[in-house]
């Protein structure tokens, strides 16, 4: 059984001054799978996240939709919120009702509200099909290869080596230095290049 | 020529598949700069425009979309 | 240079090329071919007796043919390492089968004519590509400058070698044809750059500044000399750059805005015909030396390297960064970073900055013992996979391999091929899912079912 919770963010007045957030939450309650929907001033704030955590426990939510800013901004934030509430972070879905709705339709409040409702519907539909995902880990060999030993390669090799890692600096020519060592003085300071 | 009132109020429904890394970010940027465009576009985020299966486009038309934009 | 060679954490391998790269971020296996130097580096002390006594002289590549080197040589006196190599194409031991002078004179018995290439495979967590640039081959297309026929029409790099105190002329600016000091030196900018007809469309970025430096060096080193610069624009965006250019102009360099239409030899002079577009009239200069500011192009071999590492390149062969502003040293291949002119023409300050940036990205990666992979990657349903392999060439990250699985069918064990996604390489773009006819490939987090559900919900 999917139990989706929808959290609509005002983002202060950023969203709420254009989109009728109460209407969005109200509409969300009728979408398939949604068992809870509410709105709050700043969903990303501590009390906002606490609201999500509390509701996950109280309503036994297993999917969360946050309608707020772009996922490019706060997806990591809300994934952590889910994780801290004991839910797999990938059960989160976001509806972008700020950058791609409120901010671009400021003069069309009715249109923006309808669009916000539809964006939430889309996010809920996707969230219902979200599956818990687990990142796996891969080991890391602590050595670096630098291909090309000109000024760029030498600088990179030195910086990596100074940080304590082993570096192999490779060049196809018999010497390191690249084009740089062919140069005489270099602009703008006219110091030597070797 | 008389303009049909109904027809002039008709708004097409457009589904836009936007690549997370570029077009979707561009749509965010439009918001950031407070540009304005009609509210009849629905953006669906994909990880890459290469993710857009022709089947998705067909399905959108099948379900009544009037236009489909693939941007990436 | 010496700092890099002497650093205890840096192993310098020269005269070697990358042959193959396997693996993925954190776990690259790189096959390196160490070309045979014919000199045992563990015995050689760099004393120089061999190249002093070597009887064969050839043009030095390092000095672009302005000077000579021996068949056993180090490219320049301060080379690192100071271990010579034998040029098998010219060495008499290899061409005629007899000589052996270097072997006889070597005090440490380091010369080994039987030495073979050594191929090693080593593991790395990260790779920095810093393969740099070479100069646009202007001789092939610029007939108006003589197709390289005139010895006194040279490139900026030749000019650098002449200016170098350890170069072929000991730092004296001379005409390659007769060794005389030039009195009138013409510089031509944008040779091969900003020229869509014959060269590249891009601006090569460093030329305006090095030409200003060259003009300054002419005026400084040759009393009474004239430096005339033909230019399209003067571009000096950099700290203290405009000031440097102004200084050169105040020192007496003459800047003429216009292109050169023709150069021809008359007596021992090079007649340079061009146009001054600001004054709207023809200009003819009788020059002693012409220096071309040739465009930077990617260093040869970029295509092979791009293929090996799965790097994208732009239309001119420069490696493509993951994002032009926000991810300038990363590539689309996780764990592979780019620095310097292999990404695009640039000058030394920018190169150093970018190299340090790439180094930080490498350190970021190496500072962890293991890394978490994004779980939103492609997966294969082996029951559905027909093993057609269509997904393999589509993957921009070379993350799909074919593997053989065995299963029991009707009491018999059968083997069949299926696609297999490498978690370290897959970046989750989902291109493979689109070509998969059997629907065996799906992208976690953006599954076909999820996206279709979104489409349906959006179209209600």
Image: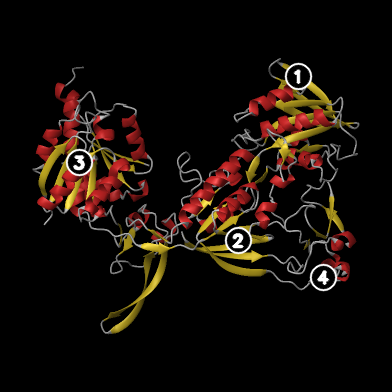
The CA distance from mark 4 to mark 1 is: 64 Å
Mark 1 surroundings: few (<14), some (14-19) or many (≥20) residues within 10 A: few
Mark 3 surroundings: few (<14), some (14-19) or many (≥20) residues within 10 A: some
Residue at the top extreme of this rendering: C279
The quarter of the picture where residue C274 lies is: top right
Mark nearer the N terminus (1 vs 2): 2
**C178 in relation to C378, above or below:** above
Which mark is in front, 1 or 3?
3
Q: Which residue is mark 2?
A: C18
Mark 2 surroundings: few (<14), some (14-19) or many (≥20) residues within 10 A: many
Q: How far across and how far down the image is residue C227, in percent? A: 79, 26
The CA distance from mark 4 to mark 2 is: 30 Å
Residue at the bottom extreme of this rendering: C411
Residue at 13% across, 54% down: A2
Q: Chain of mark 1?
A: C
Let me know if residue C223 appears in the view: yes
Element marked by disc 2: strand
Residues tagged 4 and 2 counted as in contact (Cβ below 8 A): no
Q: Which residue is mark 4?
A: C108
Q: Which residue is mark 1?
A: C282
Element marked by disc 4: loop
Residue at 23% across, 53% down: A84
Which mark is in front, 1 or 2?
2
**C407 in relation to C148, above or below:** below
Residues tagged 1 and 2 counted as in contact (Cβ below 8 A): no
């Amino acid at each position: 059984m999917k139990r989706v919770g929808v959290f609509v963010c005002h983002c202060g007045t950023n969203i709420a001054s254009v989109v009728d957030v109460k209407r969005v939450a109200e509409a969300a309650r009728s979408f398939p799978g949604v068992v809870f929907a509410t709105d709050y001033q700043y969903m990303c704030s501590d009390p906002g996240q606490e609201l999500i955590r509390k509701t996950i426990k109280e309503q036994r939510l297993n999917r969360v939709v946050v309608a707020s800013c772009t996922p490019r901004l706060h997806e990591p934030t809300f994934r952590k919120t889910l994780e801290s509430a004991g839910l797999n972070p990938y059960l989160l879905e976001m509806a972008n009702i700020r950058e791609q709705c409120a901010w671009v339709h400021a003069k069309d409040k009715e249109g923006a509200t309808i669009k916000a409702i539809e964006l939430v519907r889309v996010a809920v539909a996707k969230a219902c099909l979200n599956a818990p995902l687990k990142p796996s880990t891969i080991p890391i060999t602590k050595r670096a290869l630098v291909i090309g030993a000109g000024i760029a390669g030498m600088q990179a090799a030195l910086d990596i080596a100074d940080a304590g890692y082993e570096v192999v600096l490779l060049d196809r020519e018999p010497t390191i230095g690249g084009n740089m060592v062919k140069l005489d003085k270099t602009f703008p300071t006219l110091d030597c290049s070797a | 020529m008389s303009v049909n009132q109904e027809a002039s109020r008709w708004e097409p429904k457009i589904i836009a598949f936007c690549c997370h890394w570029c077009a979707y970010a561009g749509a965010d940027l439009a918001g950031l700069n407070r540009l304005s465009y009609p509210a009849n576009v629905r953006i669906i985020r994909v990880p890459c425009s290469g993710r857009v299966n022709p089947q998705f486009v067909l399905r959108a038309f099948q379900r009544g979309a009037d236009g489909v934009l693939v941007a990436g | 240079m010496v700092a890099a060679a002497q650093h205890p954490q840096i192993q310098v391998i020269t005269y070697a090329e990358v042959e193959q790269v396997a693996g993925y971020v954190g776990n690259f296996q790189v096959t390196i071919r160490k070309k045979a130097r014919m000199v045992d580096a563990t015995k050689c002390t760099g004393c120089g007796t061999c190249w002093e006594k070597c009887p064969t002289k050839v043009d030095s590549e390092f000095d672009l043919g302005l000077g000579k080197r021996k068949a056993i040589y180090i490219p320049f006196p301060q080379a690192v390492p100071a271990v010579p190599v034998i040029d098998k194409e010219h060495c008499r031991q290899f061409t005629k089968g007899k000589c052996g002078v270097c072997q006889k004179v070597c005090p440490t018995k380091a010369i080994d004519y039987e030495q073979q290439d050594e191929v090693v495979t080593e593991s790395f967590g990260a790779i920095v590509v810093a393969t740099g640039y070479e100069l646009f081959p202007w001789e092939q297309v610029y007939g108006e400058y003589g197709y390289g026929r005139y010895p006194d029409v040279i490139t900026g790099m030749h000019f650098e070698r002449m200016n170098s105190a350890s170069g072929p002329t000991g730092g004296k600016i001379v005409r390659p044809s007769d060794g005389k000091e030039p009195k009138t030196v013409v510089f031509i900018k944008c040779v091969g750059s900003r020229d869509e007809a014959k060269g590249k469309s891009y601006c090569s970025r460093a030329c305006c500044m090095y030409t200003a430096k060259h003009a300054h060096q002419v005026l400084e080193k040759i009393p009474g000399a004239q430096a005339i610069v033909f230019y399209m624009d003067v571009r000096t965006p950099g700290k203290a750059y405009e000031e440097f250019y102004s200084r050169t102009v105040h020192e007496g360099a003459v800047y003429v805005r216009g292109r050169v239409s023709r150069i021809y030899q008359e007596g021992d002079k090079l007649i340079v015909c061009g146009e001054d577009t600001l004054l709207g009239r023809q200009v003819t200069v009788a020059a002693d030396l012409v220096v071309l500011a040739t465009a930077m192009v990617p260093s040869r071999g970029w295509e092979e390297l791009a293929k090996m590492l799965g790097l994208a390149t732009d239309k001119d062969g420069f490696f493509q960064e993951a994002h032009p502003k926000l991810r300038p040293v990363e590539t689309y291949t996780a764990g592979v970073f780019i620095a310097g002119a292999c990404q695009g023409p640039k000058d030394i300050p920018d190169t150093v900055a970018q190299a340090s940036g790439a180094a930080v990205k490498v350190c970021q990666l190496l500072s962890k013992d293991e890394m978490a992979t994004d779980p939103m990657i492609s997966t294969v349903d082996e029951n559905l996979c027909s093993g057609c392999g269509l997904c393999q060439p589509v993957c921009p990250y070379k993350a799909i391999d074919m593997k053989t699985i065995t299963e029991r069918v009707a009491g018999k064990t059968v083997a069949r091929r299926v696609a297999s996604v490498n978690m370290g390489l897959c970046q989750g773009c989902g291109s493979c899912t689109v070509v998969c006819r059997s629907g065996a490939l799906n992208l976690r987090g953006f599954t076909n079912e999820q996206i279709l559900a979104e489409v349906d919900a959006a179209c209600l």
